[in-house]
Image (cartoon, grey):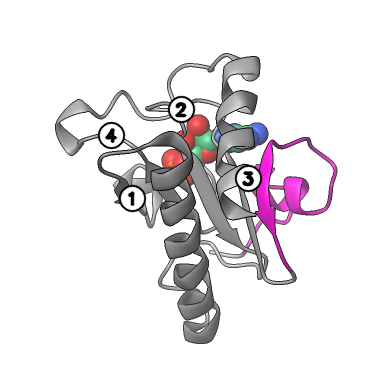
Amino acid sequence: MAYDDQNIFARILRGELPAIKVYEDDQVLAFMDIMPQADGHTLVIPKTPAITLLDLDPDAAAYTIKIVQKIAQAIETGLDAQGIVLMQLSGASAGQTVPHVHFHLIPTSVHELGRHAAQMGDQEKIKSFAEKIKAALS
Ligand code: AMP
């Protein structure tokens, strides 16, 4: 399958759609999920176009995981998270809804996971979690 450069995350990366960002560098962007499965649900994406983890260049994957760990640490500190679920869905058959590879960081227990990409969150509440994560990063 060819990469669709009109997918939502590609458009966020180009600045065509808004996102509540917590971290950005030349290779990776981290931003808040708009349909969070728990308070502080954050997404980390490589900037390189790839649909699934299987398509992603190994060096880009390694760097992205480094930032996943950094953001997880900030979620733990900033939101006093007791545990974090790291989720990565590769392929529509796995439930992937946005065809640009991404890692979910969800501060919850696997036993408490909500329905996937199901309900819009409160934007102001999401922003307040983003501010706490950003403060823990700085
Ligand atoms: P997946 O199903 O693994 O591809 O996950 C896609 C995630 O992106 C879901 O958790 C959605 O809630 C989230 N999402 C969809 N659109 C946006 C958006 N515009 N900004 C932030 N998160 C989004």
Q: In this view, does 108 lie above or below 57?
A: above
Give how far apart the Cα atoms at labels 2 and 3 are: 17 Å
Q: Which of marks 3 and 1 is nearer the N terminus?
A: 1
The verdict on label 1 being within 8 Å of ligand 1 is yes
**Amino acid carrying mark 4 in the image:** Thr
Mark closer to the chain start, 4 or 3 = 4
Q: Name the residue under label 1.
A: 87
What is the distance, in whole Å, between disc 4 and disc 1 at their CAs?
12 Å
Which residue is under mark 4?
Answer: 108
Rendered location of residue 33, percent (x, y): 54, 35
Residue underneath mark 3: 134
The residue tagged 2 is 36
Considering only order in the chain, which callout, 3 or 2, is on the residue closer to the N terminus? 2
Q: What element carries label 1?
A: strand
Query: Which tag is nearer the camera, tag 3 or tag 1?
Result: 3
Residue type at mark 3 is Lys
Q: Is residue 38 rendered magenta in the image?
A: no
